[in-house]
Image: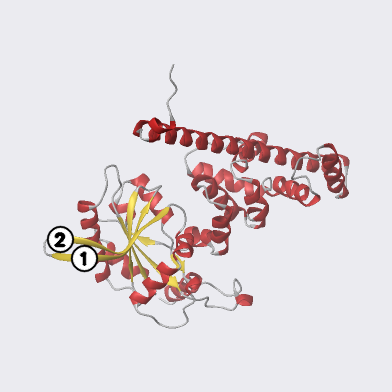
Amino acid sequence: MKKPTDTTLGVSADYRQFIEELKTRVLSARISAARAITHEAILLYWDIGHGIVEKQQSHGWGDSVVEMVARDLQRAFPEAKGFSPQNIWRMQQLYLLHNQPEFLAQVVREMEKGGKKAPTGEDLSQVVREMVSTVPWGHHANALLRVAAPAARLWYLRATARFGWSRNVLLNQIKAGAYERAVTEKKTHNFDLALPEHFAEQADEMLKSSYNLEFLGLRRAVRERELEDRLITRLQSFLLELGYGFCFVGRQHRIALGKKEYFIDLLFYHRFLKALVAFDLKVGPFEPEFTGKMDFYLNLLNDKERGPGDQPSIGIILCAEKDDVEVEYALRTKANPIGVAAYALQSKLPGELKGKLPTAKQLADIVRAEMEGGK
């Protein structure tokens, strides 16, 4: 049989397609193998931590056993990495933190909230063990084990597993307080009215109540175009702040309608939502008329640029400040999904005061309670 020559293969489109398919298959196999190795490694580390804790509780062994285990495992497996005393301490911590009653209770609440019947006892511990094993060890050792609050750690753990956050993205999300902004702060949007239930929940996860743009280095008022210029210059930082799944499409995105042209400040595509996401930047406070303009833009995007199989386009109005009641009234009659979020250009408090003063929401609740009590 005659062998194909490099010359004949070099001009063959079929061969080029064939080799690309093979490369894709190799990469897929490598990723699958890496995930399987990661999964087994975390299960091993969990079991080591579990074994140490169990022996300490049943035999009264002290903390020195950690150093002894590290030394003996390194001696038995000199070619293996990961058995340093520091790592063995982390394995013990991995097991202890995720078997705290507070953490297990949080897992049960989350499962029941999702309509699942939560297991108890050892079965619950096995569920947590499998959940923990979905995230690489570096994420645990360098980020997740530092999150003290059980509810926050569970949120970051599930988000990392679900959306494939890299270690840097996870660290950025923790530093930026993504959990607090995603769960504890009020979000303003009409997603539940404009979207199907399941998609509305996903869109709500995508939106933050506020965005931290401190990385722009601005210390003065700027015009909208300058704010846009700074965001594009620091696009990687902005994408980290936006969160998982955002892909940049363009700035001042042009859409023609008849003889007129309209321009969207920033346009993204969200890989997980499978939807276009338009941002309208405002340097001042929220005004109700902003929602009408965004509603119009979304109609254009849906009619002219929404791809086959894509979900309805989503709009986010990013402004310096907002009144939640005003936003709710402005969005009540809008058919398209629109969210409104505020942004901060710099920290409002010195580092030593952060977490020691009430939040804006807490102050608002106090004022509201005082007003109601005075009636």
* Residue type, mark 1 in image: Tyr
Which residue ends up furthest to the bottom in the rendered image?
220
Q: Residue at x 58, y 35 (%)?
A: 33
Seen in the image, is 320 located left or right of residue 66? left
Residue 108 circle label: none
Q: Is the residue 209 above or below the residue 198 in the image?
A: below
Coloring applied to the structure = secondary structure
Q: Residue at x 49, y 60 (%)?
A: 240
Seen in the image, is 358 located left or right of residue 63? left
Point out the image quarter for the C terminus: bottom left
Q: Position of residue 59 (x, y in %)?
A: 88, 40
Marks 2 and 1 sit apart, C-alpha to C-alpha, by 8 Å
10 Å neighbourhood of mark 2: few (<14), some, or many (≥20)? few
Residue annotated with mark 1: 262
Q: Position of residue 246 (x, y in %)?
A: 41, 55
Is label 2 in a helix, a strand or a loop?
Answer: strand
Q: Position of residue 98 (x, y in %)?
A: 66, 46
Seen in the image, is 94 located left or right of residue 169? right
Quadrant in the picture for residue 286: bottom left
Residue annotated with mark 2: 257
* Residue type, mark 2 in image: Leu
**Which numbered disc, 2 or 1, marks the residue that appears first in the sequence?**
2
How many labels sit on residues? 2
Is residue 76 at least partly visible in the picture? yes
Point out the image quarter for the N terminus: top left
Is residue 322 at least partly visible in the picture? no
Q: Disc 2, disc 1: CB below 8 Å?
A: yes
Quadrant in the picture for residue 46: top right
Q: Residue at x 33, y 75 (%)?
A: 225
Quadrant in the picture for residue 231: bottom left
10 Å neighbourhood of mark 1: few (<14), some, or many (≥20)? few
Q: Position of residue 260 (x, y in %)?
A: 14, 66
